[in-house]
Amino acid sequence: LQEANIEFNPCVSKDLKMYGCRQLIYSLFKNLVDNSIEHGGNNITITIWGSILQLSGDSSYRVKFTYKDTGKGIPEKDLPRIFERFYRIDKGRTRRMGGSGLGLAIVKNAVLYHRGTISAENAPEGGIIFKFDLLSLDKLDPNVPYQY
């Protein structure tokens, strides 16, 4: 972040807590940030917002996130495919030159594991916006491994 002069703004309350797989949630955010660093360009801003949506009649809740960077964005023709495994926007890139095409597939699978949804769109002023939610139970579920 420092080398690329990227400003990082986490707008998520330190009091926000959820039950879920710590490794997958970490991987989800790491892949999004790594993509912004790698493809967004220098002198951009990354902002993450988080909020809670209580589910009616249930003790669980959804944690809704919006992840935005002010970088280059993604060509509109590629947006429908960015969550596919091994999909690369720049067809000339090879794994040796960086990236396996798995980062956003990992993000999507982490969201799906937490019974959520994810979407991506280009920001009107430039950059990319990811909107996703993750289900958090009010207590640990013995049927779901790796909860914290």
Image (cartoon, rainbow, N blue to C red):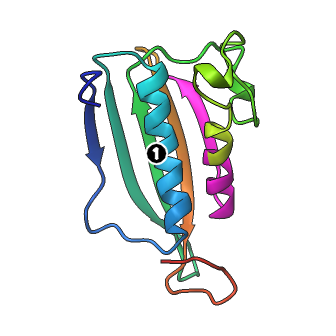
x%, y% of residue 29?
A: 46, 47
The foreground one among 98 and 28 is 98
Residue topped by disc 1: 30
Give SS at disc 1: helix
Left or right of 89? Residue 139 is: left
Residue 76 colored in magenta in the image:
no
Question: Within 10 Å of the Cα at label 1, are there few (<14), some (14-19), or many (20+) other Cα atoms?
Answer: some
Q: Quadrant of the N terminus?
A: top left
x%, y% of residue 46?
A: 34, 32
Q: At x 33% / y 66%, what residue is drawn?
A: 16
Residue 114 colored in magenta in the image:
yes
x%, y% of residue 112?
A: 68, 57
User: Is 128 placed above or below 145 here?
Assistant: above
Q: Magenta stretch?
A: 107-122
User: Tag 1: residue type?
Assistant: Lys
The foreground one among 52 and 147 is 147
Q: At x 58% / y 81%, what residue is drawn?
A: 58
